[in-house]
Image: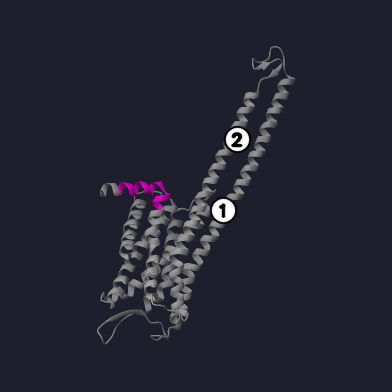
Amino acid sequence: MISVVLLSSLVGNFMVCKTVWKIPHRKPFSYILVANVAVAELINSLCISIIVFYEEKGSWTLGKATCILTNPLLVLTMCVITNSLAIIAVYRYRATLNKTRPSGPVKALVIAGVWLMALVITLPLFITRRLVQYSTGDFECRSYFPGDKNSYTPSYNKYTIVRLIFTFAVPYLVILSAYVALAIKLKLFVRKTENQDIDMSSFVSSAVDHLQADYNTNASPNASPRMAHGKPNIKPEKLHLERNIKNRRRKRKLTVEKAENHLLRMVVVIILIFVICYTPYQVIFLWEYFGGIENWQFYYHELLRDYLFVLKCLPSAIHPICYSAMNSMFARAFTRTFTRCG
């Protein structure tokens, strides 16, 4: 099962990166952020495959360099993924109903800043990672923080709390806040648009009434052929203006409603991915480190943890599917690729 998930993640995210790379110059910032997430998920999936191999074999046989890099890169890319999603949420909030877009240098600084922040957060793991050989000949790859022992790791526990806060708690709080603020922003825009349409309708109606009064005042037998019995025949013009206003109002309302529907779907997808895929494994992870889970373990505890680990890996495979389902460009690119392969 985990092999299928990891293979889907590798193929799907590679296709996402390829699709964004083929976009002509001046790529939209949202696509750059999506590609950034895809690159991080590619590296993340590769690291997970190495860790799965290590757990199945029971000994680290891939060398010291791989030991030092694998787990820290796994944590680093997870931090990049969650914080990139947070930036996407903030960007959607700023870009909706606002035509200003960031310049090229700003885009580069944002992407570099995400990776640099993730590197700072995971730097202690790179420094403290060690490969230890036991008398049995087996190798273990783990982190040794100053003052920690094999079963007593207060320093590592404190670092874990800080890392989880910046990797999960803060980004998802930003995501939720950004989408709630965007929903409020769209609601206010709808009300403002409706009020403007009402004011415009009143203005046009008043203008037409004044025009009709002017025609009545200046009416003469030699007036324009548009005169009928001394009165201007302007009712069709008034109806045409009112019809245009109603059409514009309807189109604006449909546009905003469509944006709101897309927003709600994105909010639901993000929340479900976080709650269903990430939360269970993180809960059992924290419980094993900080709670007396030994008193609550049951016969299938190890099996449950393995399945929760698979569930945790699912977002990397689901994200490309979400992109193709919610974006026509990715859908066309994926279809062309699968058609050629077929």
Is residue 24 at all visible to an observer of this figure?
no
- Quick one: SS at disc 1? helix
Residue flagged by tag 1: what amino acid is it? Ala
Residue 302, numbered label: none
Label 2 packing within 10 angstroms: few (<14), some (14-19), many (20+): some
Q: Nearer the viewer, residue 79 or 117?
A: 79
Instruction: Identify the disc placed on residue 183.
Output: 1
Please say whether residue 331 is one of the residues in the magenta stretch: yes
148 shown above or below 67:
below
Whether residue 96 sits left or right of residue 284 in the image: it is right
Write down the region rendered in magenta.
323-337
Q: Does residue 225 appear in this view?
A: yes
Q: Is residue 98 magenta?
A: no
Q: Specify the amino acid type for callout 2.
A: Lys
Q: Position of residue 97 (x, y in %)?
A: 55, 48
Residue at 51% x, 57% y is 90
Residue nearer the viewer, 227 or 339: 339
Quadrant (top left/top right/bottom left/bottom right) for the N terminus? bottom left
Residue located at (41% from left, 78% from top): 298
Q: Is residue 73 left or right of residue 216?
A: left
* Drawn side of residue 226 relative to residue 280, left or right: right
Task: Reply above or below: 94 against 41.
Answer: above
Magenta stretch: dominant secondary structure: helix
The mark nearer the N terminus, 1 or 2, is 1
Task: Identify the residue position indicated by label 2 in the image.
Answer: 246
Question: Label 1 vs label 2: CA separation?
Answer: 25 Å
Q: Position of residue 167 (x, y in %)?
A: 46, 68
